Image: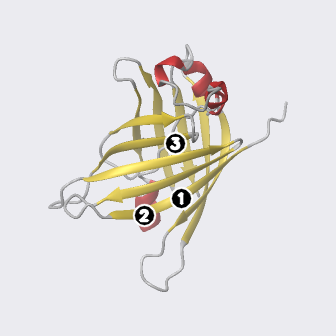
Amino acid sequence: MRVLFLISVVFAMPLATKAAEKASSGAAVPAAALSGQDVLAMEEGVWDAAIEFPPTAPGAASTHATGVQTNTFVTGKRWIKNDFAVDAKYGGHGTWGYDPIKGKYVGIWVDSNQDYIRFDEGVFDPATQTMTWSSELRQPAPHPPARYRMTEEFRGDTRVLTMTAIGPKSGKEIPLGTITFRRRRSTH
């Protein structure tokens, strides 16, 4: 059950490896200057996911799972949709893109473990090829919502997503897991 709960907070993020290459000086490039289609194109395809959750107690072993993420464009190529399945026990779906009015990436996420739509906002750092998403993570009553952060580093055909909850009262960062995505090679 813990694995399924932690997986429920998974949300894959759009990044721009190509966009980072366009930054000739290494200085930050405003996201609005990036081509939305180029950014989303970096996410298109089928990705194999290796998931690791931290131990729940001292001396305990990490928990592992595998999954498949499929990212496809919505008609018009302004948005990309994500379907994510893990070990035939979990399913999730998200849609994301760039909102020029907010000046941020935005996304929504629903899955088989949540009873609400999660709204995410993200910023991309082309110098480090890292996307950082934030949102609110509902907790069982009577606990207040926690802040949720997902940081994703792009390394060519590999992406590493680190998920962290931030305690609403303590501010303590609680690691929730890491997912390493590897893009499948095209068979065409």
| Three-letter code for the amino acid on which mark 3 is drawn | Ala
In the depicted structure, whether residue 176 falls above or below residue 45 = below
Could you say which is closer to the camera, residue 4 or residue 56?
56
Q: Are marks 1 and 2 in contact (CB under 8 Å)?
A: yes
Can residue 107 be spotted in the picture? yes
Q: CA distance from mark 3 to mark 2?
A: 17 Å
- Quadrant of the image for the C terminus? top right
In the depicted structure, whether residue 132 falls above or below residue 170 = above
At horizontal 47% and vertical 44% (from top left) the residue drawn is 11
- Quadrant of the image for the N terminus? bottom left
> In terms of secondary structure, where does tag 3 sit?
loop
Quarter assignment of residue 173: bottom left
Residue density around tag 3, few if under 14, some if 14–19, many if 20 or more, within 10 Å: many
Percent of width and height locating residue 43:
61, 34
| Three-letter code for the amino acid on which mark 1 is drawn | Thr
In the depicted structure, whether residue 25 falls above or below residue 185 = above
